[in-house]
Image: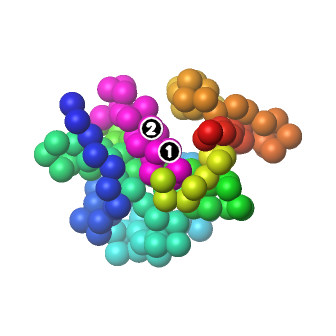
Amino acid sequence: MDHVLQPVLPSHFAVIAGWLDSPEATLRWAGPGVPIPLPADAFAAALALPMRPGWALLDADGTCLGFGQFWQTAAGSTHLGRIIVSPQARGRGLGRALMMALCAEAVRRTDAVQLTLKVYRHNPAAVALYRDLGFVASEEASTPELLFMARRTA
């Protein structure tokens, strides 16, 4: 099935916020300071859009199935964050499709030579996916809870 990555639209906000089914999920995905529940009208401000542009992964019917953000953190370095796939669509390879499209868009828009991300250590599926996509863990930059990973783009 073909998927397309496009800038997130206000019409996607309620859908994505609906994937956050608990305070723990909201904190884990969005970080501290994001309202729980996350109202659609607070979505853009809570996620610092457009300073940190958001991207939606859509299926052929235009259904939003994934979301992610990226922002430049230093010259040549772009951070990927708030990466999520609809709970109803997990297990179908959409995380890989989302990450491949998000990485390509980040490089295209920021001329990044390095992509970085943080992932919870207790999320082995995500850690394995990121490793498979070429991200390498850096224990020096990690915490007991979060694994910092980076990938060269060239």
What type is the residue that disc 1 sits on? Cys
Q: Secondary structure at mark 2?
A: helix
Residue 59 in the image, given as x and y percentages of width and height: 22, 42
Residue 61 vertical placement versus 72 (above, below): above
- Residue at 28%, 46% (x, y): give it: 4
* Of 19 and 98, the residue lying toward us: 98
- Residue on which disc 2 sits: 100
Residue 33 in the image, given as x and y percentages of width and height: 59, 68
* Of 76 and 87, the residue lying toward us: 76
Secondary structure mainly formed by the magenta segment:
helix
Residue 35 vertical placement versus 82 (above, below): below
Q: Is residue 141 left or right of residue 150?
A: right
- Residue at 41%, 43% (x, y): give it: 101
10 Å neighbourhood of mark 2: few (<14), some, or many (≥20)? Answer: some
Residue 32 vertical placement versus 107 (above, below): below
Q: Is residue 83 covered in magenta?
A: no
What type is the residue that disc 2 sits on? Met
The C terminus, quarter of image: top right
- The answer, for residue 16, to whether it is visible in the render is no
- The answer, for residue 78, to whether it is visible in the render is yes
- Residue on which disc 1 sits: 103
- Residue at 37%, 69% (x, y): give it: 39
* Of 148 and 37, the residue lying toward us: 148
Q: Which residues are magenta?
A: 89-107
Q: Secondary structure at mark 1?
A: helix
The N terminus, quarter of image: top left
Distance CA(mark 2)–CA(mark 1): 5 Å
Q: Are marks 2 and 1 in contact (CB under 8 Å)?
A: yes
